[in-house]
Image (spheres, rainbow, N blue to C red):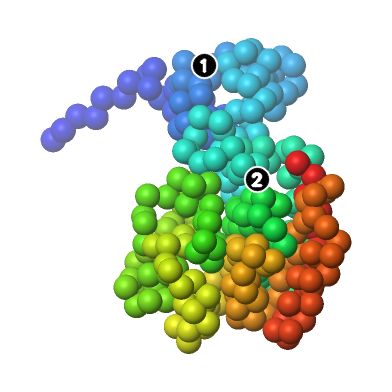
Amino acid sequence: MQNNIINPSSSSISINTARTGKIGRLLIQQGKISTDDIDKILVAQEKYGLQFGDAAVKLGLITEVDVRQVLALQFNYPYLQTDQGSYSSELVAAYQPFSPQVEALRALRSQLMMRWFNESNKALAIVTANAKEGGSYLAANLAVMFSQLGERTLLVDANMRDPRQQIIFNIKENRGLSDIIAGRAGLDVVNQIEFFDELSIVTSGTIPPNPQELLNRASFTYFMNQAASQYDVVIVDTPPATESADAQAIVARCGGALLVSRLNNTRLADITEVRNQIAVTGARVVGAVINDF
C-alpha cells in the first residue's frame, strides 16, 4: 500500500491560495505575484481593511493597471496591456479601455444597439465621404467593443482599393473577401482574433482589378447572408463613397450605414452627396459620427 505524505508547507500554501479569492488566483496565474507574496498581501489586507488587489498595490507588488486587467478577466471583459498582442495603437478599445475616447465609443455602441441591432438587423456599413476621415479606425474599434459585449462579431474589410484592417490587426493571411466572392477561397480565411474570443475578421483579400463588379455579384450577397446567420454583429468597412460606387453596393447589402466625417475636414456638400447615394439604395442612415483626432 502506498503511503501518502502530507507536506505541511504545501498544505499552508493551498489554504492561503484559496483565501486570495478569484482576483488573487488570476494574479498568480498571470505571474503578477508569487505564492510567496500571498501571506504578505493577506496580512496587509487585514491590517488596512483592503481588497486583495488593493493590498497588493499598497505593497508595491502590482500596479493599478494589473488590478484592472484581472477585473476585466473576472468580468469577461477582455482588453490588452501595451505589451500584449501585435496590433496597431489605433485599437484604443483594446489598449485604452478607460479613456474618454473609448467612453464616447461606448455611448455610440449603446445607440447602435438600441437603434439598429436590437431591431433584428445584423450588418452595418461604416461609410466616409473621403479617405483619411477615420472610417477604418471606427470600424475596427466598434468591432472590438461589440465583441467585448459578448456579441459574436465579424469585421469585414470591403475596401478592396486601400484596405486597412489587415494592417490594424496585423493579419498575415493574404486571402480574404475578394477571394471568397471570386470563388478562390472559402470561410477558412476568416481570422479569429487572439485575446478576443468573440471577434473574427475577413480582410479585403487579393487586390482585384474590378472591385465594383465583384461587390455587385450574387456571391457577395450570399456571403453577407451567411455572415448574418452566423454572427450577432457584422461591421463592414467601406471605401470612400465619393471616390467610387463601391460603398453603395456594400450599403445596399447591409441595409444600414453609419456616416463618418472628420472635424474641420469633411465638407457638408460631400456628406450630402453620400446621404443621397445611400438613399438610392433604399438603405437606412442609422446615424452620423464626427471624428476629432
Q: Which residue is mark 2?
A: 93
The residue under the point 80% across, 55% down is 266
Disc 2: CA contacts within 10 A as few (<14), some (14-19) or many (>=20): many
Q: Position of residue 276 (x, y in %)?
A: 79, 77
The residue under the point 53% across, 75% down is 212
The residue under the point 70% across, 84% down is 281
**Where, quadrant-wise, is the N terminus in this rendering?**
top left
Mark 1 residue type: Asp
Q: Nearer the viewer, residue 26 or 68?
A: 68
Secondary element type, mark 1? helix
The residue under the point 58% across, 16% down is 61
Q: Quadrant of residue 22?
A: top right
Q: Earlier in the sequence, mark 2 or mark 1?
A: 1
Query: In the figure, is residue 222 to the left or right of 3?
Result: right
Is residue 221 visible in the rendered image? The answer is yes
Against 46, is 70 above or below? below
User: Comparing marks 2 and 1, which lies closer to the viewer?
Assistant: 2
Q: Position of residue 113 (x, y in %)?
A: 74, 67
Mark 2 residue type: Ala
Mark drawn on residue 256: none
Residue at the extreme left: 1
Disc 1: CA contacts within 10 A as few (<14), some (14-19) or many (>=20): some
Q: Position of residue 27 (x, y in %)?
A: 53, 29
Q: Position of residue 171 (x, y in %)?
A: 42, 50
Q: Which residue is mark 1?
A: 37
Residues at marks 2 and 1, CA–CA distance in whole angstroms: 32 Å
Against 291, is 122 above or below? below
Number of numbered discs? 2
Is residue 122 visible in the rendered image? The answer is no
